[in-house]
């Protein structure tokens, strides 16, 4: 596949205006037509970037990002998006806030909102906390701006929470569509757990993929070993979305079964559900020793399933033995995926990753720029 070489059409003006001022904290919060509008903006920014056009819509504005979990690629995507839009990016460790000293998320939002013009947050390891924190931060920002009658729009971008990873899954969807111009309807997508010897990873990528891909008519099969199930409400949403879109959603305990005849495979590790829940109480108690024990138990559980790897044999089970391999990166090469499969798809996963930056750009632009349709047209000239 070659990079985007033409500018996609500008979305409908009224549809864009309906997104003005809004923050996307879960993809399931927005309707499918709203997501289609957003994806059209993502595509437009990708086309402008590949064409070497400036997309500096802002000047003298600040884009803060708080990371409560490790990251390299998402930090890069945030910085790249801000820089291309003309925002000055600042990325800080979430532990540097006063949250651990009793400051509420609403208070944090007010403090950051008085200076920032956009806020990204990654808070993904504790079930029940990450997305709630983002919503409270957003409330704090909005309440502060309303109290001082400040007309600024300060969107909050979910850079991964306990439930969803919207910028990643939107990037995934854009890449799948680029590789499948006829659409995803009828395409079999295998979302599978895979073995990892590193830390017990969040549930949110698998959950977000399940909730989003099922909205576009795909035949989605989720595979995981016993004990690695996902949050029930996300699975219910995925099943309902598949039914509404004319696709399907199935959960199996066999990686081979998921890969059989698949058009797209997405093998990615996540932590065992019950232990991820135990993190909640340990985190509230600030019990670092227990958190360390939970991590060790999770990795020991992972080690029982070392055969869950995306290798050449499993890729041979896919449709024509040539499925599109996807991963949000970084992949544990030799554990989640074989060296050979990764070598074959190195460029593919890089192209997949690049769309995350454009997704962040689009989320900031639709929320902050009035008359965005006109501005996008001007940028293209």
Image: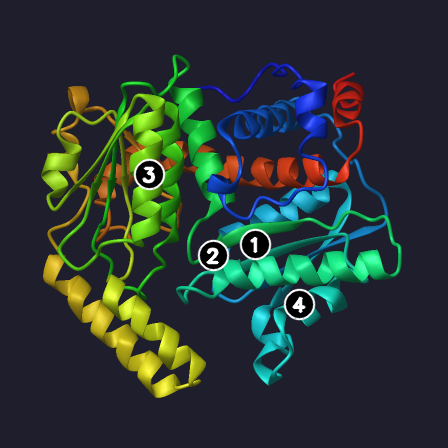
Residue 273 appears in view: yes
Q: Position of residue 25 (x, y in %)?
A: 55, 48
**Where residue 380 appears, x then y in whole percent?**
74, 19
Q: Secondary structure at mark 1?
A: helix
Disc 4 target residue: 106
The answer to whether the residue labelled 4 contacts the one labelled 3, judged by CB atoms less than 8 Å apart, is: no
Is mark 4 in CB contact (under 8 Å) with mark 2? no
Front position in the image: 59 or 273: 273
User: Tag 1 or tag 2, which sits nearer the N-term?
Assistant: 1
Q: Which residue is mark 3?
A: 238
Residue under the image location 50 percent in, 56 percent down = 72
Precedes in sequence: disc 2 or disc 3: 2
Of mark 4 and mark 1, the one earlier in the sequence is 1
First-in-chain label (3 vs 1): 1
Q: CA distance from mark 2 to mark 3?
A: 18 Å
Q: Quadrant of the N terminus?
A: top left
Residue 142 disc label: none
On-image quarter of the C terminus? top right
Name the residue: 57% across, 54% down: 75
Circle 4 sits in a helix, a strand or a loop, which is it? helix
- Indicate the quadrant where residue 145 lies: bottom right
- Mark 1 neighbour density, 10 Å: few (under 14) some (14–19) many (20 or more): many
Residue 117 point in image, percent of width and height: 77, 52
Mark 4 or mark 2: name the one nearer the start of the chain.
4
Q: Which residue is mark 2?
A: 161
Q: Which residue is mark 1?
A: 75
The answer to whether the residues at label 4 and label 1 have Cβ atoms under 8 Å apart is no
Marks 4 and 1, how far apart at CA: 23 Å
Is residue 210 visible to the viewer in this orientation of the structure?
no
Q: How far apart are labels 4 and 2 at the CA level?
A: 17 Å
């Amino acid at each position: 596949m070659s990079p985007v070489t033409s500018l996609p059409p500008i979305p409908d003006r009224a549809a864009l205006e309906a997104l003005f001022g809004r923050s996307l904290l879960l993809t399931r919060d927005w309707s499918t037509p709203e997501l289609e509008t957003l994806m059209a903006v993502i595509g437009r920014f990708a086309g402008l970037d590949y064409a070497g056009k400036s997309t500096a819509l802002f000047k003298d504005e600040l884009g803060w990002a708080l990371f409560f979990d490790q990251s390299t690629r998402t930090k890069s995507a945030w910085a790249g998006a801000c820089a291309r839009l003309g925002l000055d990016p600042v990325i800080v460790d979430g532990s540097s806030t006063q949250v651990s000293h009793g400051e509420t998320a609403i208070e944090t939002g007010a403090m950051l909102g008085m200076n920032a013009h956009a806020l990204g947050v990654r808070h993904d390891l504790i079930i029940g906390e990450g997305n709630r924190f983002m919503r409270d931060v957003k409330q704090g920002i909005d309440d502060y701006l309303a109290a001082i009658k400040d007309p600024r729009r300060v969107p909050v971008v979910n850079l991964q929470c306990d439930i969803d990873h919207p910028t990643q899954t939107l990037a995934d969807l854009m890449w799948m569509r680029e590789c499948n111009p006829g659409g995803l309807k009828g395409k079999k997508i295998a979302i599978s757990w895979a073995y990892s010897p590193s830390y017990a990873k969040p549930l949110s990528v698998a959950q977000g993929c399940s909730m989003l891909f099922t909205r576009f008519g795909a035949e989605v099969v989720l595979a995981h070993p016993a004990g690695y199930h996902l949050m029930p409400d996300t699975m219910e949403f995925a099943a309902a979305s598949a039914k509404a879109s004319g696709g399907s959603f199935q959960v199996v305990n066999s990686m081979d079964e998921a890969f059989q005849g698949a058009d797209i495979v997405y093998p990615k590790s996540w932590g065992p559900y019950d232990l991820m829940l135990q993190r909640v109480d340990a985190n509230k108690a600030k019990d670092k020793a227990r958190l360390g024990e939970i991590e060790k138990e999770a990795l020991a559980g992972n080690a029982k399933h070392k055969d869950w790897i995306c290798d050449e044999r499993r890729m041979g089970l896919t449709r024509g033995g040539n499925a599109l391999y996807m991963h949000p990166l970084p992949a544990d090469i030799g554990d989640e995926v074989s060296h050979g499969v990764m070598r074959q798809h190195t460029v593919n996963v890089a192209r997949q990753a690049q769309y995350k930056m454009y997704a962040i750009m689009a989320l900031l632009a639709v929320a902050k720029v009035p008359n965005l349709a006109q501005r996008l047209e001007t940028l293209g000239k």
